[in-house]
Amino acid sequence: MNPARLAVVVLVGLVLQVSLFSRFSYDGARPDVMILLALAGGFVLGSDRGAVVGFASGLAFDILLTTPLGLSALVYTLVAYSVGAIGDSVLRSTFWIVPLVAAAGSAVGMILYAVVAEVFGQPAFSGPPLTAIVVVVSAVNAVLAPLAVRAMRWVRQSEADNRRHPYFIR
């Protein structure tokens, strides 16, 4: 895993989340691309490195939110680790696995976020309905999942992989 590439992907995801996806709304619910990066990190990089991606994307998003610092980081870390642990036993050869994992992981992540927010005393259920949040986030993340997985594969690629390529030029 290349940390500089991870920082670039998280930063691009954060900019897209704040500038583009925050403008889309259905019944008050907005897409959450940062949890998609965490899910893709767990799916591509495995449970341990996926947890690092989940923590990084969650902490980057927490800096911009008014919720307690670390709430998104905690949830995204748990979801990314779980997807990475489950992903080791899942057959990855079919095209529909990635959107399915993204949709299911996003739904679980949003429900877990609401539960953890209630535990920490945040009014998670005072905004848009939880069902609208789960549907919007799951649908958008299922569509964007192949792009996020491709970005995480780019993060996984190292300089040693580039040198092994037959057309690598120094």
Image: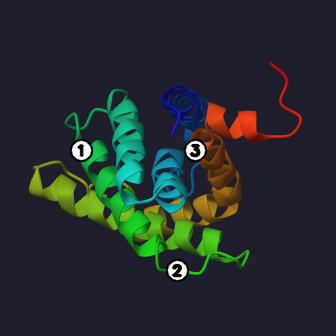
Say which amino acid is labelled 3: Arg
Q: Secondary structure at mark 3?
A: helix
Return the residue found at the far top. Answer: 170
The answer to whether 71 is drawn above or below residue 69 in the figure is below
The answer to whether 31 is drawn above or below residue 142 in the figure is above
Residue 61: x percent and y percent? Answer: 39, 35
Rendering quarter of residue 118 = bottom left
Left/right placement of residue 155 relative to residue 65 reads: right
Residue 155: x percent and y percent? Answer: 59, 40
Residue for point 68% across, 40% down? 161
Disc with the residue nearer the chain's start (2 vs 1)? 1
Of badges 1 and 3, the one in the foreground is 3
Say which amino acid is labelled 2: Val
Q: Secondary structure at mark 1?
A: helix
Left/right placement of residue 71 relative to residue 158 reads: left
Q: How many marks?
A: 3
Which residue in the structure is indicated by mark 2?
90
Q: Secondary structure at mark 2?
A: loop
* Dot label at residue 71: 1
Residue for point 59% across, 47% down? 152
Disc with the residue nearer the chain's start (1 vs 3)? 1
Which residue in the structure is indicated by mark 3?
156
Residue for point 10% across, 50% down? 121
For the residues labelled 1 and 3, say whether their Cβ atoms are less than 8 Å apart: no
For the residues labelled 2 and 1, say whether their Cβ atoms are less than 8 Å apart: no
Q: CA distance from mark 2 to mark 1?
A: 29 Å
Residue 103 in view of the camera: yes
